[in-house]
Amino acid sequence: MDEPADNADRVRAAYAAFRARDVDSVLTHFSPQIAWTHPDGLDRYGLGGTETGHDGVRAFIARVPGVFAELRPEPMEIIGVGDRVVAFGRHHMTARSGRSCTVPFVHSWTFADGLAVRFEDTFDTAPVLEILDQPADPAFAHVADGRPGSDPRKSWTHPQSGVARRGDEQSVVGGVDGV
């Protein structure tokens, strides 16, 4: 593989390696001390906050299949200036339950000496939590709140927004706390 010409090309190469599920190739574009950051709204799934270094990135990637059947970033535009690169795109996400959504993202990359030293993924977590918190398949109903037979489509309260749902009704039982 040819060496990328600039940091924007390095980001394109990292996305290509990610699409190919080649973690070793992805990491060749990252500093061994990279700060890899994702929205805190997904921290209860082990996918929020900041991981550090190649081991942290590997650990994050290893947790993804336990939450998502598919997580596919689709960069639409990549803009690089000096040591900074920004990618605008869409995340295509399918939860293990089969529910899916597509959310726009902004990825901010910072480079030093040709390697990414910081990566930050920014997107609206509300639609993602919606697909993760509501199993679509009745076979998943028993795991909704840990009680046998509980079905979040019949009665549940969203843990972040405080929205209570009973059947097809919705009512707010608390305030939004920064999803």
Image (cartoon, grey):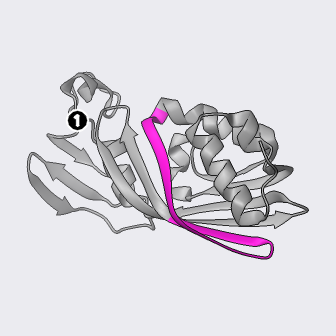
Q: Position of residue 36 (x, y in %)?
A: 70, 53
Where on the picture, by quarter, is residue 54? top right
Q: Would you call the spot at circle 1 few (<14 residues within 10 Å), some (14-19), or many (20 or more)?
A: some
Does 24 appear in magenta?
no
Q: Is residue 85 above or below residue 10?
A: below
Q: Is residue 81 above or below residue 116?
A: below
Which residue, given by chain and number where applicable, does mark 1 sit on?
A: 136
Q: Is residue 147 left or right of residue 30?
A: left
Q: Is residue 152 above or below residue 90?
A: above
Quick one: which residue is furthest to the bottom in this view?
81
For the magenta stretch, what is the residue range? Answer: 67-88
Where on the picture, by quarter, is residue 148? top left
Q: Is residue 97 left or right of residue 68?
A: left
Query: Residue at the spot x=30%, y=26% of the render?
Result: 147
Please identify the dominant SS of the magenta region. Answer: strand
Please state which amino acid type lies under the numbered disc 1.
Ala
Of residues 36 and 105, the one drawn nearer to the viewer in this rendering? 105
Query: Residue at the spot x=27%, y=41% of the render?
Result: 134
Quick one: which residue is furthest to the right in this view?
113
Asked whether the viewer can see residue 159, the reply is no
Does 73 appear in magenta?
yes
Where on the picture, by quarter, is residue 137? top left
Q: Position of residue 152 (x, y in %)?
A: 23, 39
Quick one: which residue is furthest to the front in this view?
2
Quadrant placement of the N terminus:
top right
Q: Position of residue 72 (x, y in %)?
A: 47, 45
Q: Position of residue 121 (x, y in %)?
A: 58, 60
Secondary structure of the residue carrying numbered label 1:
loop
Of residues 166 and 69, the one drawn nearer to the viewer in this rendering? 69
Of residues 162 and 14, the one drawn nearer to the viewer in this rendering? 14
Q: Is residue 163 left or right of residue 129?
A: left
